[in-house]
Image (cartoon, rainbow, N blue to C red):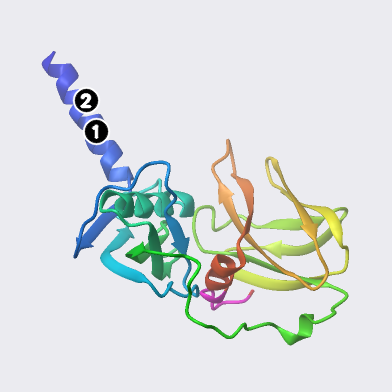
């Protein structure tokens, strides 16, 4: 029994060391949010609704041993912290993407908000790329942060054509004239496909990466929302 207990403790410590580091500063609490209620995520450039109260700040970081710290996991951890103290929104104020020479984790800081109404937001001026007015093309922003498998490069295909070579800590923008449903794909030891419905005059952000495979890893292609994509794209300073 003692050996089993030691093994269980060790396993628990291993799991906790692999999880992201969570730090929460609470200034006020409300009743825990019901699991059926949504916690909205406001991006770096999203305005905060007018009738909002900041009730805390949550930071999701890296323990130094964290491995399970992808974007979806980090956001889920932050919204769980908000839910505990009655927050129904988080406003991301800082995002540090993974890097080959630093952390392999997404690290964020976010305000925890109690929002009365999401319909009332401060007036903003829409920023639109005038080059896309009545454009006969779409803009495809492709990028890859430093991280796992940084020595592995691969071609990104649109249908039968190679449109770019994806490498570590890299980004590029491509004009796409094929409107309608298309398929982006890449292949190393395995093939990864991403169906995408292009509309002329629109912008799209594709986050690339490498996931674990049997030998050299396999490509990862993900269509992300424009606010997240723009922030991550602009955080990459090096072109290759």
Q: Residue at x 32, y 55 (%)?
A: 82
Q: Looking at the image, do the residues carrying marks 1 and 2 touch, with CB atoms under 8 Å apart?
A: yes
Looking at the image, which is closer to me, 82 or 109?
Answer: 82
Quadrant placement of the N terminus:
top left
Q: CA distance from mark 1 to mark 2?
A: 6 Å
Residue displayed at 59% across by 39% down? 215
User: Residue 93 appears at what percent x and percent y?
Assistant: 39, 72
The circle drawn on residue 227 is: none
Between residues 75 and 102, which one lies in front from this camera angle? Answer: 75
> Mark 2 — residue?
8
Quadrant position of residue 78 = bottom left
Q: Position of residue 158 (x, y in %)?
A: 82, 57
What residue is rendered at 57% in x and 39% in y?
A: 213
Does the magenta-highlighted stretch encompass residue 168? no
Determine whether, in the image, residue 17 is placed left or right of residue 49: left
Q: Quadrant of residue 230?
A: bottom right
Residue 236 highlighted magenta (yes or no): yes
In the picture shown, does residue 25 fall above or below 71? Answer: below
Does residue 132 appear left or right of residue 38 in this picture?
A: right
Q: Is residue 159 above or below residue 218?
A: below
Secondary element at image label 2: helix
Relative image position of residue 190 (x, y in whole percent): 69, 40
Residue at the image position 55 percent from the left and 76 percent from the top: 234
Residue 75 occupies which quadrant of the picture? bottom left
What range of the chain is rendered magenta?
A: 234-239
- The residue closer to the viewer here, 186 or 42, is 42
- Is residue 146 visible to us here? yes
Q: Residue furthest left?
A: 2
Label 1: which secondary element:
helix
Quadrant occupied by the C terminus = bottom right
The residue to which callout 1 is attached is 12
**Chief secondary structure of the magenta portion:** loop
């Amino acid at each position: 029994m003692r050996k089993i207990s030691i093994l269980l403790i060790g396993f628990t410590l291993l799991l906790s060391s692999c999880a992201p580091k969570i730090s929460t500063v609470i200034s006020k609490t409300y009743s825990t949010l019901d699991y059926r209620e949504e916690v909205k995520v406001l991006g770096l450039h999203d305005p905060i609704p007018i009738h909002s109260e900041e009730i805390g700040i949550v930071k999701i970081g890296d323990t130094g041993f964290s491995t399970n710290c992808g974007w979806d996991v980090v956001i889920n951890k932050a919204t769980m912290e908000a839910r505990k103290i009655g927050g129904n929104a988080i406003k991301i104020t800082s995002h540090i993407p993974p890097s080959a020479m630093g952390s392999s984790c997404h690290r964020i800081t976010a305000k925890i908000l109690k929002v009365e109404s999401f319909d009332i937001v401060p007036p903003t001026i829409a920023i639109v790329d005038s080059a896309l007015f009545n454009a006969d093309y779409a803009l495809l922003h492709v990028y890859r942060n430093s991280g796992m498998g940084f020595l592995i490069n691969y071609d990104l295909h649109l249908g039968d054509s190679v449109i770019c070579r994806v490498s570590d800590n890299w980004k590029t923008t491509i004009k796409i004239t094929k409107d309608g449903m298309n398929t982006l794909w890449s292949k190393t030891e395995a093939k990864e496909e991403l169906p995408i419905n292009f509309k002329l005059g629109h912008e799209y952000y594709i986050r690339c990466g490498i996931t674990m495979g049997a030998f050299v890893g396999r490509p990862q292609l993900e269509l992300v929302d424009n606010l997240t994509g723009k922030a991550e794209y602009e955080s990459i300073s090096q072109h290759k």
